[in-house]
Image (tube, grey):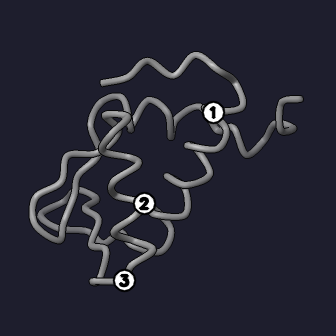
Amino acid sequence: MTAIENPREQHILYALALMCSQYLSEEHEGREVLDHLCMGAGEEAYKVLEAYGLIEVEGRGATWTQAGTDLMDRRLNQMQFPQ
């Protein structure tokens, strides 16, 4: 996992994760899982989120890692984008 220390980078990754959570997620056995639905944008988002250790990918699906869950819990959408 790559540490995300840059506030701008954190905010960008948060926005990407939030979009994935909002548009690619579904409940499975009581937890949130992601399915990129074979869409190119979803597949590319997976590559980025996985590179930062925010999700674990298995086939077309993915689950949030602890780092991904921690990032989503930060609620960066309530803050201005860092300069």
Residue identified by numbered label 1: 9
Residue identified by numbered label 3: 39
Residue 29 in picture, x, y percent from top left: 12, 63
Residue 56 in picture, x, y percent from top left: 20, 46
Left or right of 60 on screen, residue 52: right
Among numbered discs 3 and 2, the one appearing first in the sequence: 3
Q: Residue at x 41, y 49 (%)?
A: 48
Q: Residue at x 51, y 22 (%)?
A: 4
Find numbered disc 3 in the image and state the secondary structure of the residue it sits on: loop
Residue 68 in picture, x, y percent from top left: 38, 37
Find numbered disc 1 in the image and state the secondary structure of the residue it sits on: helix
Looking at numbered disc 1 in the image, what kind of residue is underneath it? Glu
Q: Nearer the viewer, residue 26 or 52?
A: 52
Badge 2: how crowded within 10 Å, few (<14), some, or many (20+)? Answer: some
Residue identified by numbered label 2: 45
Q: CA distance from mark 3 to mark 2?
A: 10 Å
Residue 2 in picture, x, y percent from top left: 38, 22
Task: Quadrant for residue 64, please give it.
Answer: top left
Badge 1: how crowded within 10 Å, few (<14), some, or many (20+)? Answer: few
Task: Quadrant for residue 35, please give it.
Answer: bottom left
Looking at numbered disc 2 in the image, what kind of residue is underneath it? Ala
Q: Is residue 27 above or below residue 81?
A: below
Find numbered disc 2 in the image and state the secondary structure of the residue it sits on: helix
Quadrant where the N terminus sits is top left
